[in-house]
Image (tube, rainbow, N blue to C red):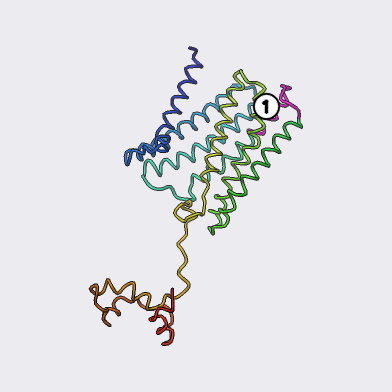
Amino acid sequence: MTRQTRTDAAFVLAAAAAVAPFALQLTGLSGGAVGEEIRLYVGNLSKLLFIGLAALSAIRSAARFESDNPMRGTWRMMAAGLLSFTAGQATLAVYQALLRLPSPFPSLADAFFVASYPFLLAALVGAIRAYRETGYPIGTARERVATAGAMAALAALIAYPTLKPVVSVPAPPLEMFLNVAYPVLDLAVLVPVAVLLRIAVRFRGGQVWKVWAGLLTGFLLMCAGDILFAPRPAHPHHLHPGLRRPGPRRPWPVPPARRLRLSAPTANRPGRRPSSAGRRRASPRRAWPAPSRSAAKGSADGRWCA
């Protein structure tokens, strides 16, 4: 077994160990409170470790290219984006794993995450240009445009059902911007990723194919996770904390007879007609005009239903 094979096997085992607690939860083996603690720390630390290693590897890759090689700038951009992503994940880990607090939204982590996307997009587009300039058999420009167009059309089909429920929920401007920006930026990253995957297929079997296949598969999984777990306004408790809002006050009056029927048993013993004192204690202070006598009579007879 070569050194490269051992390194690949170690990464596969580490990734499997990081995914195992979450896979067991999907099968019904949540592990209770202990399982929640394990997933909290494994989720935060594994993401921080893997993204940090990816950033260091990108820095080393950039240093190995000559100064006039276009891939040097590509890997520098990739390293900058991954370092920004690492800083954002580290900020979340401080809140969740160290302070044991829910991470606020928006927070400093969001600034790092959003700042990473321009660097990553520039790196991916730069890689496409670099391979085109080297003269490698990467296909025709028409094939690359067709791949990008197909991926952009697919991204638009995914974006509409993803963003429509998000923008329908009122939110402060910054929160709305972030809730829309994350899915849009993820889908934008997928366009050059699809083109690079098509280029990398021509190098399958070699080291170039393995490096790009692993890196681009990571981008695909990251974007898919962000899109699948985008906030949905199906129920207020299922939304991102930044989208939750207190419900509106009831805009219609509840008839007094209805309130008395609901509250009288708690103020009087069962089976006995509520006394006037009990009714006064059970009824909350009115926040709306009292109904007329005719309306009150109708409600007592059961003809007025709330």
Main secondary-structure element of the magenta-colored stretch: helix
Magenta span contains residue 125: yes
- Quadrant location, the C terminus: bottom left
Q: Residue at x 41, y 29 (%)?
A: 17
Q: Looking at the image, which is closer to me, 36 or 300?
A: 300
Q: Looking at the image, which is closer to me, 160 or 104?
A: 160
Query: Is residue 232 left or right of 147 when viewed as pictured?
Result: left
Position in image of residue 298 (x %, y %): 42, 83
Q: Residue at x 32, y 38 (%)?
A: 34
Callout 1 secondary element? helix
Query: Is residue 76 left or right of 22 when viewed as pictured?
Result: right
Looking at the image, the residue that sits furthest to the left is 269
Which image quarter: residue 30?
Answer: top left
Q: In the rendered image, which residue does mark 1 sit on? A: 199
Looking at the image, the residue that sits furthest to the top is 1
Magenta span contains residue 228: no
Q: Against 51, is 111 above or below?
A: below
Position in image of residue 87 (x %, y %): 49, 38
Which portion, as a residue range, is magenta?
124-140
Q: Amino acid at mark 1?
A: Ile
Position in image of residue 294 (x %, y %): 43, 87
Position in image of residue 32 (x %, y %): 32, 41
Query: Is residue 298 left or right of 204 when viewed as pictured?
Result: left
Which image quarter: residue 304?
Answer: bottom left
